Amino acid sequence: GLYDHVKELCPVDGDNIHWKYPGNPDGSFSTALAHALLFDWSGDADALIDLHGGDLHEKFSRYTVWQRSGEAELDERNERLARCFDADFIVGLDSAHMERPGRCCTAAATLNRLSLVVEGGSDARFDESHMLFHLNGVMNVARELGLLGGRPVPARRRQLAIGNYHFVTAPADSLVIPRCEPGDLVEKDQVLMECRDSF
């Protein structure tokens, strides 16, 4: 992907592994890799954490994603892990996501396993603050699981818990100019961005 200047698609098969879990050992390269990561590489792990650093042309708030399963104990433990990261948003996905392929945290929940997806970074620039966000969060998860001594360090940010997030598609090919910043609280009918031509 690096050499082919591909943002998020695997150049071998044109797929994005992020949406391919639980995968298939006999499928395409990306689906076979997803299956191997879930069942072979992390099969006996205490928790699977998928750390993301922000693709090119992405700018967003720091957030964690966990999958609601309907199993009270698993859901409580997954949400506690999600709160170990000093994130702006904690996304607890609706259990309907478990009916189709998707993120590693969704596939793990179907197996009654702990898992998170963590986003922290912007425009593929992984600076010190983003690195510390990931590092401190992973260390907190290790404390929460009893792998390290001590208690997790409480989040400094006000963590907003939400049930889902939505992808908004521009109405036409355009240059998108944001009119707000990640993490801003917005109101109904507020302009979030402008779509312009290149000139």
Image (spheres, rainbow, N blue to C red):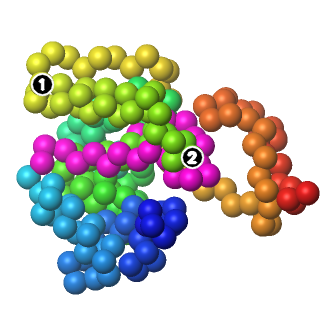
Q: Amino acid at mark 2?
A: Asp
In the depicted structure, whether residue 180 falls above or below residue 70: above
Q: Residue at x 37, y 54 (%)?
A: 95
Residue at label 2?
123
Q: Residue at x 74, y 60 (%)?
A: 170
Q: Mark 1 or mark 2, which is nearer the start of the sequence?
A: 2
Residue 69, image x, y percentages: 29, 51
Q: Residue at x 43, y 75 (%)?
A: 11
Q: Residue furthest front?
A: 3
Q: Is residue 93 visible from the viewing direction of this image?
A: yes
Question: Start and end of the magenta stretch?
Answer: 45-65
Q: Is 64 within the magenta?
A: yes
Q: Nearer the viewer, residue 191 or 99?
A: 191
**For numbered disc 2, what is the local secondary structure?**
loop
Residue 7 shown left or right of residue 186 in the figure: left
Residue 113 shown left or right of residue 105 in the figure: left
Residue 98 shown left or right of residue 111 in the figure: right
Q: Amino acid at mark 1?
A: Leu
Front label number (2 vs 1): 2
The picture quadrant where one finds residue 197 is: bottom right
Residue 47, image x, y percentages: 19, 44
Residue at label 1?
148
**For numbered disc 1, what is the local secondary structure?**
loop
Q: Nearer the viewer, residue 171 or 8?
A: 8
The picture quadrant where one finds residue 43 is: bottom left
Q: CA distance from mark 2 to mark 1?
A: 33 Å
